[in-house]
Amino acid sequence: MWKKVIAVVMMIGIMGGTDIRALASEESSVKELQTNERDSGISIMTLNTAKQNNKLLISSTHVATVYCYIAGSRDVTKTSISATLQKKVGSSWANVKTWTATTSTNKTSLRKTKNVVSGSSYRVKATFKAYKGKSCETKITYSTVKKG
């Protein structure tokens, strides 16, 4: 019985050993990217975008500061950000204010402020776009929820 089990294991190793190692290596690389993405606070998008950031800060005087940033690869010709401050109403989110910024370069940033209501919960929904020729990559992110 054990001879058959060992023979089967050896056959699998001989026939598919290389593929298994390649898959393990690929899986390891993906886990490393996911870990780096989680630890850095910056999301990895796709080939055209190097990084983007979406932050919401609320001061003790109830002023919300929205900060968003996108940096594309060198061959990106245009980038844009649409940032919407949202307020939690019941179990859903209502739009409070939307700002946009666009540049004909591979980097765009947006920094805006808005007075908010004390005790209410807020977040920012940001849409990032990176243009390369006629193609456009889009990613939507949400900031952490903050109390006014």
Image (tube, rainbow, N blue to C red):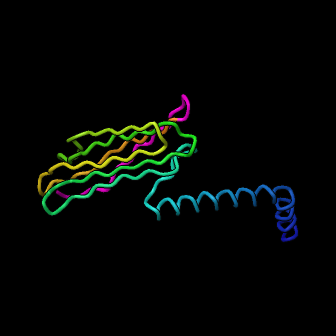
- Image quadrant holding the N terminus, namely bottom right
Picture layout, residue 120 above or below residue 85: below
Q: Residue at x 81, y 60 (%)?
A: 17
User: Residue 86 appears at what percent x and percent y?
Assistant: 24, 45
Picture layout, residue 115 above or below residue 3: above
Query: What is the residue that sits farthest to the front in this orientation?
Result: 104
- Residues 69 and 88: in front is 69
Query: What is the residue that sits farthest to the top in this orientation?
Result: 134
Which of the 4 quarters of the picture holds residue 55?
bottom left
- Image quadrant holding the C terminus, namely bottom left
Q: Residue at x 60, y 57 (%)?
A: 30
Q: Is residue 81 left or right of residue 84?
A: right
- Residues 70 and 145: in front is 70
Query: What is the residue that sits farthest to the bottom in this orientation?
Result: 2
On whether residue 42 falls in the magenta region, the answer is: no
Q: Residue at x 45, y 36 (%)?
A: 104
Principal SS element in the magenta part?
strand
Range of magenta residues: 132-148
On whether residue 140 falls in the magenta region, the answer is: yes
User: Residue 93 appears at what percent x and percent y?
Assistant: 24, 44
Q: Residue at x 81, y 58 (%)?
A: 18
